[in-house]
Amino acid sequence: MSKALIIGCGGVAQVGIHKCCQNSEVFDEIMIASRTLSKCERVAESLKGKTTTKIHTRKIDASNYDEVVALIKEFKPDIVMHLGMAFHNLVIMDACLECKVHYLDAAAYEPENTEDPAWRAVFDKRVQEKGFLTLFEYSWQWAYREKFKEAGIVGLLGCGFDPGVTQAYCAYALKHEFDSIDYIDILDCNGGDHGYPFATNFNPELNLREVSVPGSYWEDGKYITVPSLSIHKKYDFDEVGEKDMYLLYHEEIESIVENIPGLKRVRFFMTFGQSYIDHMNCLRNVGMLSTKPIEFEGREIVPIKLLKALLPDPASLGPRTKGKTNIGCIFHGTKDGKPKDFYIYNVCDHEASYKEVGSQAVSYTTGVPAMCAAMLVLNGTYNKPGVYTLEELDPDPFMDLLCKWGLPHKVSYKPVLVD
């Protein structure tokens, strides 16, 4: 029986909250904390009579270290599940260190203000050292490894689907299917239709920055950077159909390269419709994706924050979205001296997700793994102090829980390769 502090109350957090409440034997008490208290209270009210988990709510500014520390000390959770904005990862990790409490998040840290001189100096150095232009990467959080070990606490990074499950798929493939892996292609397909001319399936500030920056992949010992959306492929996804997909940089590439030996290439592809690309390019061209404040009618505003306020809330897309997602990894390597291909993936239905937890499949595929990973920390399966990404840990118990809690996987030994 454990207590979890869940920071955030957007689409992903709401799924995580529902799944924790379905798993009351482990999560007997939770606190939902967010900048908008009314959202927390609505979720808590919706779960009344449906769970034996005791639910508390609290307003919090997750960027304020003192507030986070004070709440942890008051509630005394066994784990902090940060399912809100990745901008706040470091603040919350610092608070967990102060209070010696386990930590988990769903995405790598990135700065809210990419014009900040201190961050920019580190970023420029990373570009020189590694050669990729990502705004989100693990070095900031990997710097906590020794601190977490010394404190005797666990920090799990990127415990959504991608990152998260895709890294567990890599560990599973290496453990069960291959002697060595040469190539990995991570494919993220969202075949859902929400009916809006333009909307993002998760937080617009993160989504639009992720897509609009240059793409990078790792090949032959180095990162190769290409213009945004310049590498385009078509792929026929099981239960979804043929979709256009584009090469992006994604944070799990960095950790997979660190932890899966002998790789020759790792790439990440995501599907987009032409309407999404046209809208994004137009918004980028007129400066609406900028994080640099501008003066407007005597007030300072950040363009991308204004855009976020104008776009549909991703958490509101659930009742409108139809179709399925298909996310997985294609591997090529050797087994017993012979070449081998292997594809492992999950298909998730938007309408079924909404029926179960009131959220669409993009949130579902992120919130479910977060609950499963937290459970493994709490029950002692993932109990080695330090900071980890999921390909560093035994994938079997995690994947068993995914199957039990709503994200079963499928496999193919004769996949169509991307090239």
Image (cartoon, helix red, strand yellow):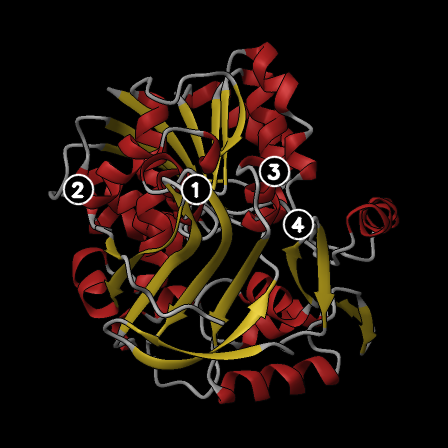
Which residue matches tag 2?
404
Which residue matches tag 4?
110
Tell me whether circle 2 and circle 4 mark residues in contact (CB < 8 Å).
no
Marking on residue 159: 1
Element type at mark 1: loop
Q: Is residue 180 visible?
A: yes
Element type at mark 3: helix
The disc, 1 or 2, on the residue closer to the chain's N-terminal end is: 1
From the viewer's perspective, tell me whether residue 168 is left or right of residue 285: left
Tell me whether circle 4 and circle 3 mark residues in contact (CB < 8 Å).
no
Which residue is situated farthest in the front direction here?
A: 337
Element type at mark 4: loop
The disc, 2 or 4, on the residue closer to the chain's N-terminal end is: 4
From the viewer's perspective, tell me whether residue 102 is left or right of residue 220: left
The disc, 4 or 3, on the residue closer to the chain's N-terminal end is: 4
Q: In the figure, residue 215 lies in which quadrant?
A: bottom right
Tell me whether circle 2 and circle 3 mark residues in contact (CB < 8 Å).
no
Task: Sort mark 3 into few (<14), some (14-19) or many (20+) by Cα contacts within 10 Å.
Answer: few
Amino acid type at circle 1 is: Cys
Q: CA distance from mark 3 to mark 1?
A: 17 Å
Q: Nearer the viewer, mark 1 or mark 4?
A: 1
The disc, 3 or 1, on the residue closer to the chain's N-terminal end is: 1
